[in-house]
Amino acid sequence: MSTNLIYMRKVEEQKRSDNFRKVVRESVTSADDFKTDTVRALYRWWAEFQPDLPLRADFDISRHWKLAPSLYLVEVLGPGRYRNRLNGETVVDIVGTSLRGHEITPQDPLPEIRLLSDYLDTLVAGRTARRCSGVADVFGKKYLSFETVDCPLVDEAGDIRFIIGAMSLLR
């Protein structure tokens, strides 16, 4: 008798107040995991530092100007606590609002923010890039696919202090 193992992805299907639906959060295995050039480009930049993690100071926006509208930056304040520091225009369009300056905690009244806090904790604990995908209702169109990459950045002591990410719609 043989046993077939089927890998099941956990799909977040809770009611949300943002534009996202059916979010899946996964590990990154290679740049080939990504379908959009923008997200793939940020991951490739981050992966060039492996096995080390890049410093926040290693990311120079002038070298990645084409990515700027799709970038976001999250500051690590402590376990379960984060602050959204930057949202490019494309990120604001896809999310449906700017979260710049918004604190991300497990106590937030919005379920999507609590889920995001848990997810960011996995990034910090795992010290590796992760990715998200799913459906976004953007620009009056329902069911557009999106993808992200989330990459931890360290300080001089090697502690993760920021997470830089890129978000794109799949066309």
Image: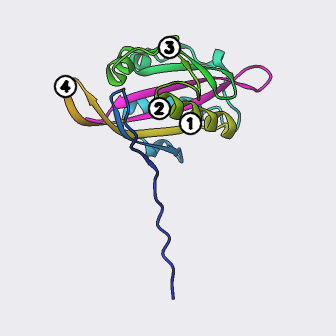
* Distance of label 3 from label 1 (alpha carbons): 18 Å
Q: Which residue is mark 3?
A: 86
* Distance of label 4 from label 3 (alpha carbons): 24 Å
Q: Nearer the viewer, mark 4 or mark 3?
A: 4
Q: Amino acid at mark 3?
A: Leu
Foreground: 52 or 93? 93
Q: Secondary structure at mark 3?
A: strand
Q: Which residue is mark 4?
A: 140
Which label belongs to residue 111? 2
Give residue 170's position: percent from left, percent from top. Answer: 30, 36
The residue depicted at 59 percent of the width and 29 percent of the height is 106
* Distance of label 2 from label 1 (alpha carbons): 12 Å
Give residue 2's position: percent from left, percent from top. Answer: 51, 84
Q: Is 80 on the left-hand or right-hand side of 87? A: right
Q: Which residue is mark 1?
A: 119
* Distance of label 4 from label 1 (alpha carbons): 28 Å
Q: Earlier in the sequence, mark 2 or mark 4?
A: 2
Q: Earlier in the sequence, mark 4 or mark 3?
A: 3
Per the rendered image, the range of residues in magenta is 147-171
- Looking at the picture, does residue 118 appear above or below residue 66? below
Q: Residues within 10 Å of mark 2 (few under 14, many from 20)?
A: some
